[in-house]
Image (cartoon, helix red, strand yellow):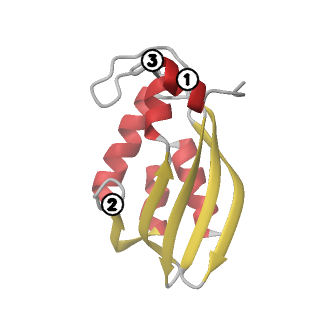
Amino acid sequence: MIVRRFVEAYNTGNLDLLDDLLAPDYFDQTNKVGIEGLKQLINMALKAFPDYHETIEDIIAEGDKVWIRVTITTGTHTGEFMGLTATGKNLTAEMVDIFRVVNGKLVEYRDVTNRLEFLRQLGVIEYTEKGKQLFLAGAK
């Protein structure tokens, strides 16, 4: 399946594979980039998190849409990321990625990610006491 191959390309840093998977008019709705911009983002992310790995937990496909739920199972912040110096902290997260597929190629992408939790794990932000009560109650 094309979406599995996309996640594999991201996990391995095999950006040449993207040329086979993405339509010429591919657009990432989350980051507002096309193919070359996506490659730059992936390169930046993998330099910052060289051990980054996503695991697909669920896949739902209907019509031209494919939804996946992924878990970031490893991701150690060892390089600069969007102006943030390396923290050495590990990142784990759950995301939902939504793809649109036309004629066997990915043409559109968007994701749903808790970016505040991402920044909290990296130590960039800290929840207030009330935020800890609301969002971290029962968290491991």
Callout 1: few (<14), some (14-19), or many (20+) C-alpha neighbours within 10 Å? few
Instruction: Tell me which amino acid carries mark 2.
Output: Ile
Lateral position of residue 48 relative to residue 85, left or right: right
Check whether the beta carbons of the residues at disc 1 and disc 2 lie within 8 A of each other. Answer: no
Choose top left, top right, bottom left or bottom right for residue 45.
Answer: top left
Measuring 50% from the left and 68% from the top, which residue is drawn there? Answer: 99
| Residue for badge 2 | 35
Instruction: Tell me which amino acid carries mark 3.
Output: Gly
| Residue for badge 1 | 132
Residue 134 seen in render: yes
Lateral position of residue 44 relative to residue 73, left or right: left
Residue 121 seen in render: no
Between 92 and 133, the one lying in front of the other is: 133
Q: Mark 2 vs mark 3: give the one in front.
A: 3
Q: Earlier in the sequence, mark 2 or mark 3?
A: 2
**Residue 118 higher or lower than 28, as above or below:** above
Could you tell me how far apart the alpha carbons at marks 2 and 3 are, in whole angstroms?
31 Å
Between 32 and 123, the one lying in front of the other is: 123
Task: Please identify the quadrant where the C terminus is shown.
Answer: top right
| Residue for badge 3 | 123
Q: Mark 1 vs mark 2: give the one in front.
A: 1
Between 36 and 29, the one lying in front of the other is: 29
